[in-house]
Image (spheres, coloured by chain):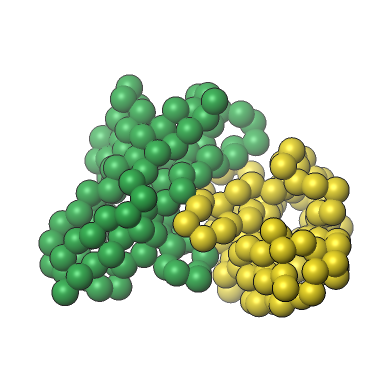
């Protein structure tokens, strides 16, 4: 079967760094996405990895290891507005380019 | 282009009533997706269109759910004889056909409450 695992909830302090992990088991791999979703709002695109390594975009970075079926999202200099759910999604190899979604990690930022 | 638009933002309906939601995707995107999301869960795939053709429908989707995209632009999702278990956020997303690197752009969603 296909499965994506993320921690349910994490807590971090304003100004600190947090790493949110995602492991996946899918039938083929054609890219991994991270989305941010604030409560009651739609998911918004954060990052995309298709090759191994680190992709940096401002305060956010995303890492991928295809051999390990593993990714993480790294958030630096945390701000209160970063309190949200972070969704990991993997695109399989079928022709429909469907995304398989994790349940999301709720990140709580404390002052 | 103002992104993906969904209407209404909120809908409260009595059990047994029919409801219809609308989604206007980004104009140059030819793929349109409908998802359902409940609290603490990731989006659950319902169906998707490439242009006007409905190419896939979730096996979890009952016959009470139907979606259309008549001219390959906007789409509608209808739920007939609503049940309390249908209460959820209904998300629409669009993407380019190739998809690689673009992911999906989501609308703000329609929150359905069945009472």
Name the one closer to the observer, A40 or A74: A40
Q: List x then y, in percent, for residue B52.
A: 81, 51
- Tell me what residue is drawn at x 69 percent, y 48 percent: B46
Q: Position of residue B97 (x, y in %)?
A: 64, 44
Q: Identify the image quadrant of residue A98.
A: top right
Image quadrant in which the C terminus of chain A is located = bottom left
Q: Is residue B111 left or right of residue A25?
A: right
The quarter of the rendered structure image containing the N terminus of chain A is top right
Give residue A110's quadrant in the image.
bottom left
Which residue reaches farthest left? A16
Q: Tell whether A23 sits left or right of B57.
A: left
Residue A111 drawn above or below residue A87:
below
Viewer-side residue, B38 vs B7: B38
Residue A46 visible from this viewpoint: no
In percent of width and height, residue B35 lies at 64, 54
Q: Residue B48's x, y, as percent?
A: 71, 47
Answer with left or right where residue A89 lies relative to residue B114: left
Q: Residue at x 61, y 29 (%)?
A: A94
Q: Give the residue at x 70% y 76%.
A: B11
Instruction: Give the drawing colour for chain A.
Output: green
Which chain corresponds to the colour yellow?
Answer: B
What's the residue at 67%, 64% (across, down)?
B87
State how many labels appear.
Answer: 0
Query: Is residue A41 visible to us here?
Result: yes
């Amino acid at each position: 079967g296909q499965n994506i695992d993320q921690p349910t909830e994490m807590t971090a302090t304003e100004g600190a760094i947090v790493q949110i992990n995602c492991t996946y088991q899918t039938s083929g791999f054609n890219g991994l996405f991270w989305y941010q979703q604030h409560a009651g709002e739609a998911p918004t695109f954060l990052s995309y990895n298709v090759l191994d390594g680190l992709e940096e975009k401002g305060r956010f970075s995303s890492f991928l290891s295809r051999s390990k079926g593993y990714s993480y999202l790294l958030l630096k200099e945390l701000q209160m507005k970063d309190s949200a759910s972070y969704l990991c999604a993997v695109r399989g190899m079928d022709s429909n380019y469907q995304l398989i979604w994790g349940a999301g990690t709720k990140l709580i930022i404390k002052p | 282009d103002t992104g993906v638009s969904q209407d209404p933002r909120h809908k409260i309906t009595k059990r047994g009533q029919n409801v219809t939601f609308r989604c206007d995707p980004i104009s140059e995107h030819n793929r349109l997706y409908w998802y359902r999301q409940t609290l603490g869960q990731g989006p659950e795939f319902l169906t998707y269109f490439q242009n006007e053709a409905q190419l896939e429908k979730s096996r979890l989707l009952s016959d009470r759910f139907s979606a259309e995209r008549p001219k390959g632009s906007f789409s509608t999702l209808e739920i007939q004889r609503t049940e309390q278990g249908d209460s959820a956020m209904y998300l629409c997303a669009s993407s380019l056909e190739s998809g690689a690197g673009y992911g999906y752009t989501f609308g703000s969603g329609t929150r359905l409450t069945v009472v």
